[in-house]
Image (tube, rainbow, N blue to C red):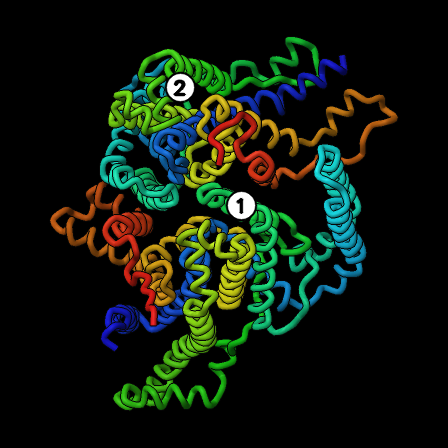
Amino acid sequence: MRKNLNVIAAYSIMMVLILMVGIFQSWNIALSIFNLCLISAVMTMGANIQWGYAGLINFGIMGYTALGGLAAVLISVDPVQEAWRAGGFDILMSLWLIVVMVLVIRFILKRFEKSKIRTYSIAAIIISGILLIRFSAEPGIEAIEAVDPAKTGFLGGFGLPIIFSWIVGALFAGGLAFIVGKVALGLRADYLAIATLLISEIVIAIIKHEDWLTRGVKNVIGLKRPAPYEVDLQTTDWFIKLVEKFNAGKLSVIENLADRQAALNQLVIEGSSVFVKLCYSGLFLVVVIILLILTQKALYSPWGRMMRAIRDNEEAANAMGKNVVKQHLLIFILGSAIVGIAGAMLVTQDGLFTPGSYRPMRYTFLIWVMVIVGGSGNNFGAILGGFVVWFLWIEAAPISLFLINFFTAGIPETNALKAHLIESVPYFRFLLMGLGLLFIMRYRPKGILPEKIEIK
Amino acid sequence: MDFVNAIILLLNYIFIPALTYGSQLALGAIFVTLIYGILRFANFATGDMMSFGTMATILFTWYFQSLGVSLGVLPTALLAIPFGIIFMIFYMLLIDKFVFKYYRHQKSPPVQFAMVSIGVMFVTQAVVRIIIGPGDRRFFDGEKFIIKAREFKEMTGLNEGLALKSTQVITIFVTIVLVSLLFWFLNRTKTGKSMKAYSDNEDLALLSGIDPKKIVLVTWVIAGILATIGGALYGLDKSFKPFTYFNNMLPIFAAAIVGGIGNPFGAFLGGYVIAFSEILLTYAYKKFFMYVLPESMEPNSLVQLLSTDYKFAVSFSILVIVLIYRPSGIFKGKVL
């Protein structure tokens, strides 16, 4: 118990902060912060597995998040029959061509010795294959995008419950990680960082511009939900009764019957959105706890010890007969798959998929700040990092507004500098994050909750 | 005649824009490569440092404009750039003193430097946005075109116009002057040579009496000049927006690595490699073929290899391919 005192203390402070937001601002804001904290925690767990366990640097988190989001769309949206009839055949043909191309290349790689001719012929196959696929898919893509472009204009999905997408998102992200890992894992750390960053940008470019698959920047809205809708709740009897029971004290003060009814209505509207958010919190909490148990078990298993050995001294681990390349690939896939889950969860919670919103600041670098600040190598630390950094990211604006007002209290409202500062309040969050990262790296390089390995 | 038209078409839509864009990338890439070669880390704050220098230039431009100072046909920004450079160098040295110096003395691994540079990136981004805001700023004044497309058509009687923007000429001219000066400095002066020695083998350089503090100082000064001029030229040619500058970091990295990181000449050429391949692969050649081929063979489609949406993806794919097959870059840089 005493050993874990700092963990318990850190988490209690975090919970008190969120509760304070609930009391002083509103429960709605507190819960939406809490939900995004949970999603961030899942992302940081993924990044922490790669960086903390194995020392692999992955700046492509944004790409895996977006793929998870894409999974949510492809699983939950109902298929657009008309689009399938218009261009489904062409798309399937192109898919088939891609498979054939990959198989041919694999065959050549296996069959022939490494030589200049082999390299050139593979390059020729890839280039001619891409051209062929472009020409064969073009009419299909155009036909699909012409189907009711204001509403659909894409193939749609499978029409399954969106919750399945959390698993499919993990598979998508893991698949991409397999390819990226095969290609890039041999690189030195800072080159790996740049390569993964650029690959994630390519992924986003594809998702943004392949309208037939993702609707691109036209966004997909109104995704299915695993939780009830607010509008339905507001007309459900048991929910109204529940709200009435909760607020019995408040309501009984109001004498006038009509006023009381109006107040109740207001409470029901507020309560319904809080209730929906609570449903999400429950679902996310289950995911976080399952992942935490699994990652903790892995960390203290022989496999976890091997990963740390590889991280701390690659050559020695290699000499002991551990397959470093294979383990690196495995952990790269596992970590990315977890990020994919988080991406699907994020889209599930928002109910919409907006490819234009995936930006490296928010989805790659911020997650890295979370991992470093929280404590790499320690799962509790990584989760805490997700909570602390997301909380500050959201609350930075109100805090800096308060500070600006406090320090410029003597200056009149019309002062140009004061007005300018108040106008640029949203950007203080970048400053806060940057300074936080720099201070933590300088004075507490292992994070708030450092890695602690107990040898029993 | 058709053949001349085709040449003019390519000049107007591919060659001149790519040369301009390539020059802007090249300056940034030399900045990245110098920091990598001498201070030994991948600077993720590159784009934002360039936007800081541009911001300083813009602020001085506004100040001069308010004073009524101008260069006539040339943009006022040219006058403001030296002041912007001083500001930029001051900011970089400040950051080096409070942030990077500590890790240099600790001999931290490059990954840690990269993480720290992300912290610097966040801070710089915040500073730029707080001072000048996130919006689009144009600060170009003076004569916009040297040759207008219509005038060119009237002059030569061709079907295709050739437009030459003054910013394009300024960019190419300034780049040539700056890069020649830089290579003269690196190859011919004692300080330049000691920088090269320090980059090749730090211990040996220290043993032969090279002062590391001076090397670091000179590196930041050169970096400040390159970052400000590169950023300001990009801003003059297109427009200044902090987010675009952050995004430009990626093709700049690609250029530096393609050219062989740590090798300034490679970075210089790498900028053009990236710029030309981006524009060549995403240009629609339909009109070109209409001029060159006989009428019966004219293409129906746009003859575009990739849609312009994939402009960035092209440079990143080139980088990934280079990283896999020739990690030291086209012109041998530091081997991984």
Residue drawn at x 23%, y 75% as measured from the top left = A2
Residue at point 68% right, 68% down? A158
Q: Is residue B236 visible?
A: no
User: What residue sits right under mark 2 in the picture?
Assistant: B75
Write the residue at 49% across / 60% down. A335
Residue lying at the far right of the rendered structure: B296
Q: Is residue A38 above or below residue A213?
A: below
Residue B89, placed above or below residue A366: above
Locate residue A230, reporting x and y percent: 48, 76
Q: Callout 1: few (<14), some (14-19), or many (20+) C-alpha neighbours within 10 Å?
A: some
Q: Which mark is residue A186?
A: 1
Left or right: A186 in relation to B79? right
In this rendering, is residue A122 above or below A323?
Answer: above
- The picture places residue A193, in percent across and down from the top left corner, at 46, 45
What mark, if any, has residue A380 been given in the picture? none
Q: Is residue B150 visible?
A: yes
Circle 2/circle 1 CB separation < 8 Å: no
In this picture, residue A159 sits left or right of residue A217: right
Q: Chain of mark 1?
A: A
Q: Amino acid at mark 1?
A: Gly
Which residue is at a point 41% across and 38% down the rendered structure image?
A: B42
**Badge 2 amino acid:** Pro
**Viewer-proximal residue among B240 and A418:** B240
Residue A162 placement: quadrant: bottom right
Query: Quadrant of the rendered structure where residue B177 is?
Result: top left
Residue A329 at what x, y percent from top left? Answer: 55, 55
Q: How many marks?
A: 2
Quadrant occupied by the N terminus of chain B: top right
Rendering quarter of residue B182: top left
